Amino acid sequence: MTADAPTRISPEVFDELDAFLVQLNGAAAGAILPLFRADHGLIDKGGAKGFDPVTEADRGAERAIRALITERYPHHGVIGEEYGEDRPDAEWVWVLDPVDGTRAFIAGLPVWTTLIGLRHQGKPVLGSIGQSFLGELYIGHAGGSRLMTRGTSRPLKVRPCPKLSDALIATTDPAIFQDAEREAWRAVRAGARLARLGCDAYAYAMVAAGTIDLVVETRLQAWDIDAAIPVIAGAGGLTTDWQGQPVGPHGGRVAIAGDRACLDEALVALSAV
């Protein structure tokens, strides 16, 4: 799944949707911030499968986002982590992860994000990665991405890094990799200069901002990655699966990079899985 350039969508429609995306992030922040580093109503929904936290911030933010979408665009579909699918085959579909990085959220670490993506005819065309505690909103499409923070806005651009040996890389947690995946990650990590862990989708934003060069993840859901694809594309980066192909509509194994040469070098190990 790749981010389409906005050629089939009029500039006026794109501007309207972009402004609405900013509004959605504001509504999510209103539900989340009062609960950060406070009584967030933690529930473990994992059961026998292991710890899988959800908080009232997750649920309240998704409710707020869905309410605005229903009011403004009742014909649009929604796919959300907390409340499932509603018209997932519609022409326009919003893909939501209200708090990506719930573990960071409950630990009081400001690297959780709100992910909001928009598909048009099945492909992600607009997206945002919001960190409202820091006042940061990374937003974009294939035609360009920007960082909005505290009343300012600046373009986002990935940095050149043609060699993996010079790269700063990231993953959420090496424990997510299993068997051959683990060996592939170790090979990529051994070839890189530095690795940072535990940033979830905030690391994706840092690729777009030009401070991280490569992110490797596995077992992602659509709501974990859809929003990032247009942001990365608009900043000049790439998002692929581990075979170097477009990410599918249900997520999976994903590599995000700012430089094609660095990505290609990492894919030598990743594509062997």
Image (spheres, rainbow, N blue to C red):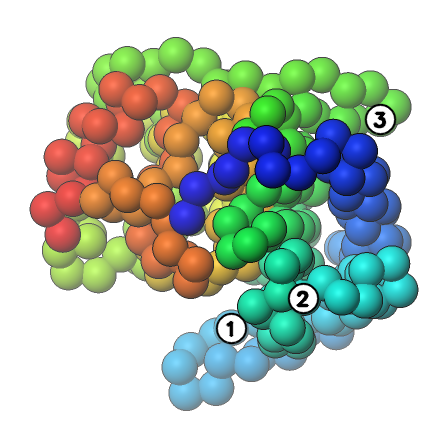
- Left or right: residue 72 versus residue 215 is right
Q: Residue visible at 37% across and 49% down?
A: 247
The residue under label 2 is 77
Query: CA–CA distance between discs 2 and 1?
Result: 26 Å
Q: Could you say which is closer to the camera, residue 267 or residue 229?
A: 229
Q: Amino acid at mark 3?
A: Arg
Residue 56 against residue 96 in the figure, above or below: below
First along the sequence among labels 3 and 1 = 1
Q: Residue visible at 28% across and 43% down?
A: 245
Residues marked 3 and 2 touching at CB (< 8 Å): no
Examine the rendering and report whether any part of residue 92 can be seen.
yes
The residue under label 3 is 150
Residue at the bottom extreme?
Answer: 48
Say which element carries label 1.
Answer: loop
- Left or right: residue 35 versus residue 202 is right
Q: Could you say which is closer to the camera, residue 142 or residue 63?
A: 142
Query: CA–CA distance between discs 3 and 1?
Result: 33 Å
Quadrant housing residue 136 = top right
Q: Which mark is residue 52?
A: 1
Between marks 2 and 1 in the image, the one whose residue lies nearer the viewer: 2
- Left or right: residue 120 versus residue 232 is right
Residue 213 against residue 36 in the figure, above or below: above
Q: Amino acid at mark 1?
A: Asp
Quadrant housing residue 39 = bottom right
Name the spot of residue 214 as percent of width and height, x first: 36, 31
Name the spot of residue 62 as percent of width and height, x first: 74, 65
Count residues near mark 1 (Cα–Cα under 10 Å), then give few for <14, some for 14-19, many for 20+.
few
